[in-house]
Image (cartoon, rainbow, N blue to C red):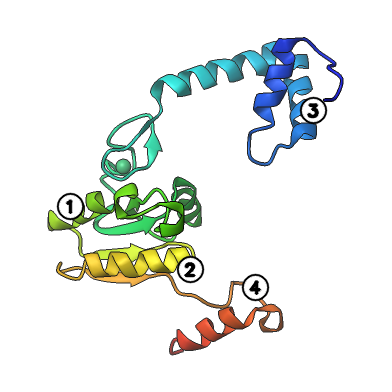
Amino acid sequence: MSKRIAGPEIERLIQLLAKVPGLGPRSARRAALHLIKKKEQLLAPLADAMGEAVEKVRVCTTCGNVDTADPCMICTDPRRDPATIIVVEDVADLWALERAGAMNALYHVLGGTLSPLDGIGPDQLTIKQLVSRIAQGAIREVIIAVNATVEGQTTAHYLTDQLAGFEVKVTRLAHGVPVGGELDYLDEGTLAAALKSRTAF
Ligand SMILES: [Zn+2]
């Protein structure tokens, strides 16, 4: 145990901050000290914002996104294409795709990937909810945007099977050369996938 340098309230603040992704114990201490020094300008408004988030944040019962409204802002946005759903593993992936800004579609957050060894089967994910959204009949295309990992691809195949009975086009993200990527630096798997999914000029 390292020596305590501050009262229990401050120690607790440091310990909690250290659990935030991207902050280790060292940066947590720096962040805590910064917050304490800027008590009025930063610590108090942050505490307010966090309190409000605790009270208002909820999971969208339609798509699994997190927001302060249910259905969420994406589900109720009239400018989005209501015939296309992008299926993602996690809300972080939804945010990443939104930052890319390439499509104006609806989403469905699975909450993970199929992983029998970890006890994650179809019932632990929101697959039933996805199928019932498709069954309503308004969706024309389902874009499966899961990670290019073994679990991600297993999940993609499972979803494709589940959606086989519906009049819906099921597509997936292209696998291949990243934008700005040099061929020489790519692994064999990525190069092979890029060759297989080549497109016409
Ligand atoms: Zn939603």
Disc 4, SS: loop
Residue under the point 14% across and 57% down: 135
Q: Give the labeled residue for mark 3.
A: 30
4 or 1: tag closer to the N-terminus: 1
Q: Crowdedness of circle 1 by 10 Å Cα count: few (<14), some, many (20+)?
A: few
Disc 2, SS: helix
Above or below, 34 relative to 127 = above
Q: Crowdedness of circle 4 by 10 Å Cα count: few (<14), some, many (20+)?
A: few
Which quarter is ligand 1 in?
Answer: top left
Disc 3, SS: helix
Where is residue 158, by image quadrant?
bottom left
Left or right? Give the position of 183 relative to 161. right
Q: Is residue 115 visible?
A: no
Q: CA distance from mark 3 to mark 1?
A: 48 Å
Where is residue 33, by image quadrant?
top right
Which amino acid does the dot numbered 2 rest on? Val
Above or below, 116 relative to 74 = below
Q: Give the labeled residue for mark 1.
A: 132
Q: CA distance from mark 3 to mark 2?
A: 38 Å
2 or 1: tag closer to the N-terminus: 1
Left or right? Give the position of 197 relative to 163. right
The numbered dot on residue 150 is: 2
3 or 4: tag closer to the N-terminus: 3
Is disc 4's CB within 8 Å of ligand 1?
no
Between circles 2 and 1, the one closer to the viewer is 2
2 or 4: tag closer to the N-terminus: 2
Where is residue 162, by image quadrant?
bottom left
Residue under the point 44% across and 86% down: 199
Q: CA distance from mark 2 to mark 4?
A: 25 Å
3 or 1: tag closer to the N-terminus: 3
Q: Give the labeled residue for mark 4.
A: 180
Q: Is residue 14 visible?
A: yes
